[in-house]
Amino acid sequence: MGASKGTITFKDVKQNFSTMRFPDSAGTKTLTDVTTLKTALVAFTDCHISGEGYVDKNKFTVDGADATDNKGIVTCQDGDGNVHKWAIPGYNGTPVQDNDGFTIEDADRDAAITAIAAFTGLTLSALRSPYIVTR
């Protein structure tokens, strides 16, 4: 079942952000509809409008086997030297121990980076990707 969300992000003079999220249960709205809603709401705020968006999300009812406390932090660097990190909650691979603790297994990290690079269009190089437990 797909659920869509429209978002409007506000920013105040101290650079604080707040995002309103609007579910679209009918699934028939577009970004233009979010813009129309933003135009109607802007009169009620002293904040700047920082952004608007419309996102489709598929929801699933499959239960996972583990808690989200175990996280694999996929860490990589793009061609400009910028470091990017994405957390995989509930990481279920086998972490590898090095001198600084546990990391995501290289094969898992590389597969995740390949998928992220294909989606983002970035050229990414793998960096040490830690495995952490936050409970």
Image (tube, rainbow, N blue to C red):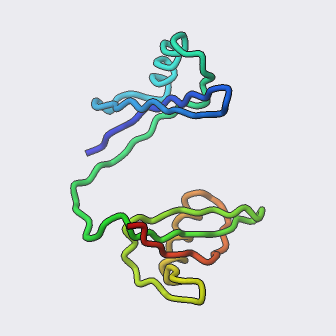
The residue lying at 67 percent from left, 73 percent from top is: 125
Q: Quadrant of the N terminus?
A: top left
96 relative to 117, above or below: below
Q: Quadrant of residue 20?
A: top left
Identify the residue at the far top of this view.
43
Q: Residue furthest right?
A: 80
Query: Whole-percent x and y of residue 122?
Result: 65, 61
Q: Position of residue 10 (x, y in %)?
A: 56, 27
Q: Is residue 91 above or below residue 4?
A: below
Position in image of residue 126 (x %, y %): 63, 75
- What residue appears at the point 32 percent right and 33 percent down from the top-left corner? 27
Instruction: Classify 108 as above or below 44.
Output: below
How many numbered discs, if any?
0
Residue 117 screen position, x and y as percent: 59, 64
Q: Nearer the viewer, residue 3 or 100?
A: 100
Residue at 45%, 65% (x, y): give it.
Answer: 88
The residue at the far front in this view is 135
Residue at 51%, 82% in the rendered image: 102
Is 122 on the left-hand or right-hand side of 79?
left
User: In the visual, does 8 lie left or right of 56?
Assistant: right
For the C terminus, the image quarter is: bottom left
